Amino acid sequence: MADQFQGIEPMVYQSKINVPYSWWAGDTATRFFVALRDEKKIIATKCGACGKVFMPPRKTCPLCFTANTEWVDVSDEGTVLTFSVARRQLAAIPQDRKVPVIWGLIKLDGADTAILHYLDEVKPEDVIIGMRVKAVFSETRKGTIRDISHFKPVK
Amino acid sequence: MDRAAIIGVGMTKIEKSKVRETFADMAWEAVNKALADAGMSIDDIDNVVTTSSDFWDGRTISCMAVGDASGAADKNTSCVEGDGTYGAFYGYTRALSGSYKTTLVTGHSKGSQCISSLITNASFDPICERGLGMDMITACAMQANAYMNRTGLRPEDMAMVSVKNHGNALKNPMAQLPMNITVSDVIKSEMIADPLHKLDCSPVSDGCCAVIIAHESVATKFKQKPVWIRGLSLCTDSFFFGDRDLARSNALVEAAKNAYKMAGIKDPKKEIDIVELYDAFTYQELLWLEEMGLADYGKAAKLLEAGEFNINGPLPVNPSGGLLSGHPVIAAGLYRIAEVVMQLRGDAGEHQVKKAKTGIAHGVNGLCGQSHCVWILDKER
Ligand SMILES: [Zn+2]
């Protein structure tokens, strides 16, 4: 085929795949979010067979393949298992967050698995694995994971 | 058990932006190269597996869209969403089923056409995680921190992977980023997400790869020397990071163990001659080598420093330059298979390694290596 692009810009079709979508949160996440929103409490599901406590709450135990029937309170304090610090304003970062943005994988006291959330009120260079952190709840809470604003170091 | 072999491979050059080519254009090129490599015509292919991802392609049922260019018309065609090694795994099982003799597997991707941060953010749990705004790079930075904390690995150690792989790419005409760089260049490059500098990360890439898998009954019927599939396994870890030990990869330990067992490999350190693995980030090359049993945990960097994984070393790792030198998501694992096949046949050209009888090709799917696919390929049956 002759090179029809010689000396010209190839044609590019500009579009987007922005399709509105609604996720049914499910009864397990709903109960978790309602407790965050209305009581500033963090609750988790517990496996009746192996006793593991899951954060974020799961309806079933992936290890035992049984339904988790019990709910337990977990602490709003925990330990940072690992973390990352965005220095570039990556496209996925929400508009209201400016770099450096720090995320932690946080194991709350009383839970056996860890959740992802923001670390804040701390400089990136002061974050270390193993540090103790505490949840700070948002002023306005709408029943989402961001009803927890972030985790801050325990003084 | 029946055997199967790879009898043809074809790949496009990996580029930053193939702005002049559509997905089908890339598939057409890779498929025709694979057919020519095998000495086959499209009529010799009895079924097709295409591999793609709808989010990356910006359309639904994306794998069907390259069917025409892959010669799939009127053939039994199926699609896999995920890395190309998983599409090839399916192709292999089809060969073993007894119903198919020759399977063409393709994998394609154009990272240049979308925004990878948004696409990979969409793989997080939409209810509990996605709104926090993490993506593949910030997730893997988290894994790198956990791994460094556990093993004492330093940024300079990870940087050596970038130096080696970009250097290897100088000899691979298909690579996107051949570069002569130093550890200091890596450390001085932009910090994107601590501890990952720009040169610790694979680039955004476009490319397509195709491989042809044949049942043993027809594996020697065509002109190309078959490369035999000796061992193959894939294993998947938990979805949520907080359910896994991010400093390790249990899924890869299991996948490698199963693949070695199937291949009858007792001491992989001695019996594997070459590895092409999924180094989306520098630390991953070291962690994956360790979890595959090719280095002790936390010790791969020492071996790398000693030159063990160099192209002329005892165990060349990513002689092609790896993903760090070109990362067409989805196709990347299929490129690893094609590279190992060329190495075992002695057809790798400038980046040919010296002794290569048995090789590993490795693919990954999911955030922070949630799932791993390990192929043991062999020159001899
Ligand atoms: Zn259980």
Image (cartoon, rainbow, N blue to C red):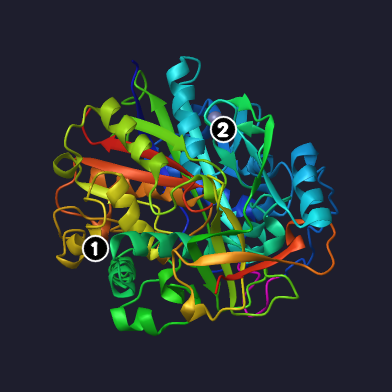
Residue toward you, B147 or B55: B147
Q: Is residue B296 above or below residue B235?
A: below
The residue drawn where x is 23% and y is 36% is B379
Query: Residues in magenta?
Result: A2-10
- The residue to which callout 1 is attached is B301
Residue depicted at 56% across the width and 46% down the height: A111
Q: Is residue A90 above or below residue A69?
A: below
Local SS, label 1 = helix
Q: Is ligand 1 less than 8 Å from the beta carbon at label 2? A: yes
Quadrant where the C terminus of chain A sits is: bottom right
Chain of the residue that carries numbered disc 2 in the rendered image: A
Mark carried by residue A62 = 2
Front in this rendered view, residue B180 or B225:
B180
Label 2 amino acid? Answer: Pro
Q: Please tell me in which quadrant of the rendered image residue A118 appears.
A: bottom right
Q: Position of residue B174 (x, y in %)?
A: 40, 61
Q: Quadrant of ligand 1?
A: top right
* Cα separation between marks 1 and 2: 34 Å
Query: In this view of the protein, can residue A143 be seen by the observer?
Result: no
